[in-house]
Image (spheres, coloured by chain):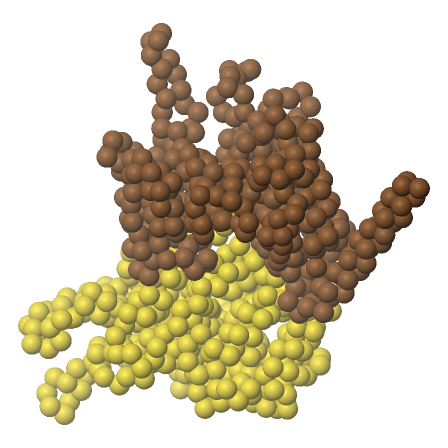
Chain colours: A brown, B yellow
């Protein structure tokens, strides 16, 4: 008897899903004026009639589970995006797709959604560059953007945090230049160049202009590294002159982290070199609910790779169905906005906000008991 | 001969400085802006990285006055519809203000974005120290070449058919050097400045342009029979340049004759090269031949920056807000911009739609013999997108 009721219930639910799907298509068609999907995106690689192709890298740890959640949502919302999936991993080199294939795919498709790649603490091959770094350097993905924003009904110490952290990610400490000059003495080179510093500063200010922000804060440690960080700072000052209507200020990284945890609302757009950016990204993510809810993106001149803001593989949760897909879904919404599919993007963001503010379905990291799957289904139900 | 000319020309900037130094009483607080903008010599531009991220471009939009804002609105509607990967940064310039702050800001935004789309900016103030904003913009960004492609629209009834002329105009010096003074009471002198360097740049631009676009002939337009030194230098330079391009035919024509020839037999022209004022006159003549101010789009090029605008530079204040302005010129300018940015797919999409609207469906505004409103034209273009 209970079996029958359950089955009946299930068919009802499926039915309602179909209905919502049908509703959605009719809901999108009327505002066709706003979103001309079929041909607008053909400069991006179009595969099927009017579909965009997007490279997909599930990554390690819980990455595949989160990516699956994104795919489910895309399928349910009937979003015209086809994924080109690559298994890409540093910890599992035998199964990993070759770097060139992945790079070519992203270069062709111009957009990519990417889970987190695990990075071991030691190198099997003696190479100092991690796979992440290789990918960034190959595509020249120099700018990393993390938008840290408080989400509704996610408990955290600070309210209304809303800052954008922009990080240079192709030079600095991540240059993979380390050597042992004498046994027991290791030197690690941090590279700062004027051209790359100017480029990232320009990116940060342009992003601020695009987003209508008022202030850019450069994070540095030029009091100690007078030449390296000094060059970064000077380049930022130089570029800041071109933006008379945006306030520019400087802050030393140690002070910055303290200010961030005590008064995060003072920050608007933050501009950082590589390592400081990494630290500030993670710190700020912690302020608004952790790695599971913060979306990020990396940009080159031509491509955009959408990935989580704080990069944790969460290997402890693999297969347990407890990871929070919010960050990945926000990434996918940002991706849709980037390729001019604004109505779909709004739909997904709306659904996420609704599920979070209802607060009935929440994953473990937000203090609930729901599974990844349940959360994904809740999102799908809220798609309008 | 040429040598003598050069020496004459070299003297001019020095002369000017000397004049300023002696007459300290005159506008004493001449800002850097005034100084720089009045100097016709080539300025060094420092390279700023272009605003191009993740395949999207940032572009400065200066709606300007008159019909500018409404036309820009149409362009944005269309861009949103076709999903062009362009983000506009809108800068409004208050025409009634007497200072140059807004213009300076607009110039800065174009410097950092690299590309601009502009309507015509009004300069309402008639005070002598307030300079024309359009001229300021061109001079400051050192956009020395102006290109106007005059091509007949089949759907627009005109006296001449199948005109296809490229007008290339020196954009930063000549009569627009804005050096005027009253030496004795009742005697006003206006200086026309022609420099060898700028003439050479624009001549090279013209011949390179002809070569790249497979054009056969370049005609230099001048008045060297009267202004033997200034226009003589310009003519001399273009003749010298022509020797480097033997595959392209070169001839010259005096401006008055040129205007007559244009209205009588416009088909003899291919690429036309001229100084600033003649360019202004000739481009308006040709626009008139093709159906008025509302169709053609012009392009300003410098070494680093490009600005796109409607071809004839008038604001159309009288018809602003009446929904009868012709949006085609601004839309054509936006197509040029898309092409410049390398978004050929979107440019082609839009160009075909405009072509269908104007030439096949003949949805036209009153100024080119139609009876439709601006918004009807735009709706028709949007409807034609993707249906070639």
In the image as oriented, which residue stretches furthest toward the front? A1
Q: Please give left or right for residue B11 compared with residue A338 in the image.
A: left
Residue B191 can be seen, yes or no: no
Q: Residue at x 46, y 62 (%)?
A: B59
Residue A327 can be seen, yes or no: yes
Considering depth in this image, is B280 or A110 the residue closer to the camera?
A110
Q: Position of residue A187 (x, y in %)?
A: 35, 18
Considering depth in this image, is A25 or A380 the residue closer to the camera?
A380
Q: Position of residue B96 (x, y in %)?
A: 31, 82
Quadrant holding the N terminus of chain A:
top right
Q: Residue at x 64, y 82 (%)?
A: B376
Look at the picture and state if A354 lies above or below A288.
Answer: below
Q: Position of residue A34 (x, y in %)?
A: 64, 67
Q: Residue at x 31, y 52 (%)?
A: A248
Look at the picture and state if B224 lies above or below B245.
Answer: below
Look at the picture and state if A89 lies above or below B145.
Answer: above
Q: Quadrant of residue A63?
A: top right
Q: Quadrant of residue B100?
A: bottom left
Q: Residue at x 54, y 51 (%)?
A: A152
Q: Please give left or right for residue B271 compared with residue B174 in the image.
A: right
Q: Position of residue A345 (x, y in %)?
A: 62, 55
Q: How many marks?
A: 0
Considering depth in this image, is A359 or A350 the residue closer to the camera?
A359
Considering depth in this image, is B259 or A311 the residue closer to the camera?
A311
Q: Please give left or right for residue B331 compared with residue B219 in the image.
A: right
Q: Quadrant of residue A89?
A: top right
Quadrant holding the C terminus of chain A:
bottom right
Q: Please give left or right for residue A28 compared with residue A146 in the image.
A: right
């Amino acid at each position: 008897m209970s079996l029958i009721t359950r089955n009946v219930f299930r068919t009802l639910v499926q039915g309602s899903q179909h209905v919502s799907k049908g509703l959605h298509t009719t809901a999108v068609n009327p505002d066709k004026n706003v979103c001309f999907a079929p041909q607008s995106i053909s400069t991006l690689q179009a595969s099927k009639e009017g579909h965009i192709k997007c490279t997909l890298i599930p990554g390690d740890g819980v990455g595949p589970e989160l990516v699956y959640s994104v795919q489910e949502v895309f399928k349910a919302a009937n979003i015209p995006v086809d994924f080109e999936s690559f298994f890409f991993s540093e910890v599992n080199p035998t199964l990993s797709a070759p770097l060139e294939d992945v790079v070519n795919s992203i270069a062709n498709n111009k957009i990519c959604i990417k889970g987190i790649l695990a990075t071991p603490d030691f190198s099997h091959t003696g190479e100092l560059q991690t796979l992440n770094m290789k990918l960034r350097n190959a595509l020249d993905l120099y700018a990393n953007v993390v938008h840290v924003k408080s989400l509704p009904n996610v408990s955290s110490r600070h309210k209304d945090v809303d800052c954008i952290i922009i990080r240079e990610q192709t030079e600095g400490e991540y240059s993979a230049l380390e050597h042992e000059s004498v046994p027991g003495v290791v030197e690690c080179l941090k590279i700062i160049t004027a051209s790359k510093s100017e480029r990232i500063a320009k990116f940060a200010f342009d992003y601020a202009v695009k987003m209508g922000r008022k202030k850019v804060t450069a994070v540095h440690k030029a009091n100690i590294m007078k030449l390296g960080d000094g060059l970064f700072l000077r380049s930022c000052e130089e570029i800041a002159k071109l933006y008379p209507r945006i306030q520019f200020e400087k802050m030393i990284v140690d002070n910055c982290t303290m200010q961030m945890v005590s008064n995060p609302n003072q920050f608007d757009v933050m501009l950082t070199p590589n390592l400081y950016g990494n630290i500030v990204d993670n710190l700020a993510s912690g302020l608004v609910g952790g790695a599971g809810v913060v979306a990020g993106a990396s940009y080159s001149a031509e491509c955009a790779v959408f990935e989580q803001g704080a990069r944790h593989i969460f290997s402890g949760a693999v297969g347990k169905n407890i990871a929070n897909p919010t960050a990945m879904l926000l990434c996918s919404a940002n991706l849709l906005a980037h390729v001019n599919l604004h109505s779909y993007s709004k739909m997904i963001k709306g659904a996420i906000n609704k599920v979070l503010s209802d607060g009935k379905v929440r994953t473990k990291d937000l203090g609930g008991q729901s599974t990844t799957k349940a959360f994904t289904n809740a999102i799908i139900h809220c798609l309008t | 001969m040429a040598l003598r000319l050069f020496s004459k020309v070299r003297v001019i900037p020095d002369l000017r400085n000397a004049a300023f130094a002696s007459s300290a009483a005159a506008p004493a607080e001449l800002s850097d802006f005034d100084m720089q903008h009045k100097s016709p010599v080539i300025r060094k531009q420092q390279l700023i990285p272009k605003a191009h991220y993740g395949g999207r471009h940032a572009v400065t939009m200066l709606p300007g006055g008159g019909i500018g804002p409404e036309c820009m609105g149409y362009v944005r509607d269309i861009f949103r519809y076709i999903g062009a990967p362009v983000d506009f940064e809108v800068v409004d310039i208050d025409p009634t203000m007497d200072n140059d702050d807004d213009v300076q800001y607009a110039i800065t935004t174009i410097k950092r974005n690299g590309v601009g789309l502009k309507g015509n900016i009004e300069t309402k103030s008639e005070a002598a120290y307030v300079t024309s904003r359009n001229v300021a913009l061109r001079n400051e960004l050192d956009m020395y070449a102006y290109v106007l492609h005059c091509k007949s629209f089949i759907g627009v009834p005109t006296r001449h058919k199948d005109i296809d002329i490229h007008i290339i105009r020196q954009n930063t010096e000549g009569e627009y050097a804005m050096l005027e003074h009253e030496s004795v009471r009742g005697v006003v002198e206006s200086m026309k400045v022609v420099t060898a360097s700028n003439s050479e740049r624009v001549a090279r631009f013209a011949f390179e342009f002809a070569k790249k676009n497979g054009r056969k002939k370049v005609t230099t337009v001048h008045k060297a029979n009267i202004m033997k030194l200034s226009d003589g230098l310009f003519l001399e330079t273009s003749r010298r340049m022509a020797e480097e391009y033997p595959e392209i035919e070169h001839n010259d024509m005096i401006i008055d004759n040129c205007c007559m020839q244009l209205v009588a037999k416009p088909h003899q022209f291919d690429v036309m090269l001229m100084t600033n004022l003649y360019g202004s006159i000739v481009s308006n003549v040709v626009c008139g031949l093709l159906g008025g101010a509302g169709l053609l789009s012009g392009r300003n090029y410098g070494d680093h920056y490009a600005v796109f605008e409607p071809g004839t530079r008038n604001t159309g204040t009288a018809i602003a807000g009446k929904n009868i302005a012709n949006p085609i010129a601004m839309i054509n300018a936006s197509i040029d911009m898309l092409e410049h940015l390398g978004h050929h797919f979107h440019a082609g999409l839009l160009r075909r739609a405009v072509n269908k609207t104007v030439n096949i469906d003949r949805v036209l505004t009153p100024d080119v013999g139609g009876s439709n409103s601006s918004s009807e034209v735009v709706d028709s273009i949007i409807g034609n997108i993707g249906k070639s």
